[in-house]
Image: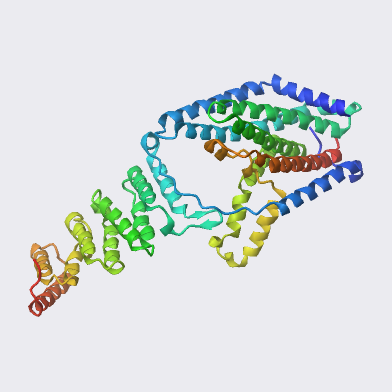
């Protein structure tokens, strides 16, 4: 099984290379870097801080959406070209197929994070850049699993990408939503306050707080404690496993 | 394309179900044991300035002015925390209001915020600071900004109990806002009266009536009655300062 997973992961990676994803990534990050130079030129103070912060936040967002679009379109193409049926006609468990795909996509995510961090290396200390890149890889791993889950469930690019985008937005804002729900600013909301509090609290249990990942403040402050990584590794490992299990359940129940 | 037909649950291996249950339990355990997020108020940063501001001006200043204004207005409400206005850095608030006015000089929103929001804090120093800001900006467009100046004059009189300040504001309306309503342009006369400057008030009121700018019959009657009262008050009081 391990060999099959490895083979599928290798071919997923090969597909990413041959569909010119690296070229697209370099172009997008290059454009963002050029824009950040523009910010650097017009800033009257803290030019480098502004430039690296702008690039870090832009690259993070670009990597997430590039990856989500790539994964959904890649899996849909495989569905449409009947490659999946051909593969599953072989002696290949469905779990190996999905595990292989996920592993391949996570390697693509790591490569994207590596390309994204390169322009930051001259601007921030190496350890900060490394922690930011690892954190971005972990965040992108969650996005890989979420994209795979959505595309296997919905089979169409548009609903899958919309769901991934909504999930990402929710995960980035869930902490702020919790804080807002706890504050007295909202008032009693005609008695709906307990229901709102419960809803937001329940949401925070099942949605990972992605605002803790790859914070731009680390880049702006040029400092971050390596200890921040441990909870992020744990959270992403658990969440990737959860999404993978959910995808597997759906995939095993599919009639091809 | 995958068909939407689903196979029975028995096709899902037990290990997959077990993984789902364990991962869900771990996720819930992690969320329950995670420290609760703490609300932290962030400081108001300086507004866009220099080349950034020039670029915004050249691009589309009106939406930018509205965004600047709304950002400032909402700044006191941050996730999970509400910052009292008196704890804001008023120099920064002034800079944001100035930026909004620079981007949209015809907009009234920044001066409304200055006079009706930020000048309402229970801190006389901050109240004065904002009222002076309104006064400083009034001169740039007195025909449109007189209402905020009038509000500032009323605040100076009733909240700060600073009649000279109120008079300064009211006089500025009388001198610069030719299209302001009569009550606003006459305010400085009644403020002089409040200060005990009966003679000066009488002279100004007499001059106003003689100028012919007050044409409404009822208003003239009211002002003449007021003039009489001023004369009586002047006769029964000490000589006023000139």
Farthest residue toward the top? A18
Q: Dividing the picture into quarters, in which one does residue B65 lie?
A: top left
The single residue placed furthest to the bottom in the displayed view is: B236
Residue A200 or residue A72, whichever sits in front: A200
Q: Please tell me which residue is depicted at 84% across the width and 43% down the height of the picture.
A: B19
Please state, as top left, top right, bottom left or bottom right, where the N terminus of chain B lies in the image.
top right
Q: Does B85 appear above or below B50? A: below
**Could you tell me if residue A210 is visible in this image?**
yes
**Residue A146 placement (x, y as % from top left):** 72, 39
Q: Position of residue A127 (x, y in %)?
A: 61, 32
Whether residue B8 sits left or right of residue A203 in the image: it is: right
Q: Where does the image place residue B61, in percent across and percent down from the top left? A: 38, 40
Q: Is residue B68 left or right of residue B111?
A: right
From where the camera sits, is residue A82 visible?
no
For this view, does A62 lie left or right of residue A54? right
Q: Residue at x 75, y 30 (%)?
A: A75
């Amino acid at each position: 099984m391990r060999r099959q997973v490895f083979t599928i992961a290798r071919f997923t990676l090969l597909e990413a290379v041959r569909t010119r994803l690296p070229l697209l990534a370099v172009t997008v990050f290059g454009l963002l870097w050029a824009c950040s130079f523009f910010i650097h030129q017009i800033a009257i103070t803290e030019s480098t801080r502004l430039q690296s912060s702008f690039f870090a936040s832009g690259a993070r967002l670009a990597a997430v959406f590039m990856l989500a679009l790539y994964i959904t379109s890649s899996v849909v193409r495989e569905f449409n070209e009947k490659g999946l049926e051909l593969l599953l006609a072989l002696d290949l468990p469905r779990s190996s197929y999905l595990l292989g795909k996920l592993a391949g996509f996570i390697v693509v995510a790591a490569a994207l994070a590596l390309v994204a961090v390169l322009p930051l290396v001259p601007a921030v200390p190496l350890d900060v850049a490394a922690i930011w890149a690892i954190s971005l890889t972990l965040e992108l791993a969650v996005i890989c699993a979420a994209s795979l889950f959505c595309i296997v469930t919905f089979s169409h690019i548009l609903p899958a990408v919309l769901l991934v985008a909504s999930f990402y937005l929710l995960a980035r804002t869930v902490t702020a939503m919790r804080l807002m729900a706890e504050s007295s600013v909202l008032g009693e909301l005609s008695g709906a306050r307990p229901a709102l509090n419960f809803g937001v609290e329940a949401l925070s249990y099942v949605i990972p707080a992605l605002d803790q990942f790859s914070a731009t403040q680390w880049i702006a402050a040029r400092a971050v404690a390596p200890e921040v990584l441990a909870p992020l590794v744990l959270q992403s490992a658990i969440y990737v496993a959860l999404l993978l299990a959910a995808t597997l359940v759906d995939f095993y129940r599919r009639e091809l | 394309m995958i068909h939407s037909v689903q196979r029975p649950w028995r096709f899902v291996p037990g290990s997959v179900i077990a993984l789902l249950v364990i991962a869900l339990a771990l996720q819930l355990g992690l969320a329950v044991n995670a420290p609760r997020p703490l609300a932290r108020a962030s400081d108001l940063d300086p507004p866009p300035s220099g080349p950034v501001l020039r670029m915004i001006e050249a691009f589309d200043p009106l939406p930018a002015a509205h965004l600047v204004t709304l950002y400032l207005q909402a700044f006191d409400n941050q996730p999970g925390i509400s910052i009292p206005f008196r704890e804001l850095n008023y120099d920064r608030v002034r800079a944001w209001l100035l930026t909004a006015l620079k981007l949209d000089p015809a907009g009234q929103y920044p001066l409304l915020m200055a006079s009706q929001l930020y000048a309402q804090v229970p801190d006389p120093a901050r109240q004065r600071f904002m009222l002076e800001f309104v006064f400083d900006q009034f001169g740039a467009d007195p025909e449109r900004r007189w209402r905020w100046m009038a509000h500032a004059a009323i605040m100076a009189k009733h909240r700060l109990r600073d009649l000279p300040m109120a008079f300064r504001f009211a006089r500025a309306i009388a001198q610069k806002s030719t299209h302001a309503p009569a009550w606003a342009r006459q305010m400085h006369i009644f403020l002089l009266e409040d200060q005990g400057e009966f003679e000066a008030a009488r002279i100004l009121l007499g001059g106003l009536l003689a100028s012919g700018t007050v044409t409404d019959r009822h208003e003239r009657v009211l002002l003449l009655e007021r003039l009489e009262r001023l004369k009586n008050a002047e006769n029964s009081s000490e000589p006023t300062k000139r």
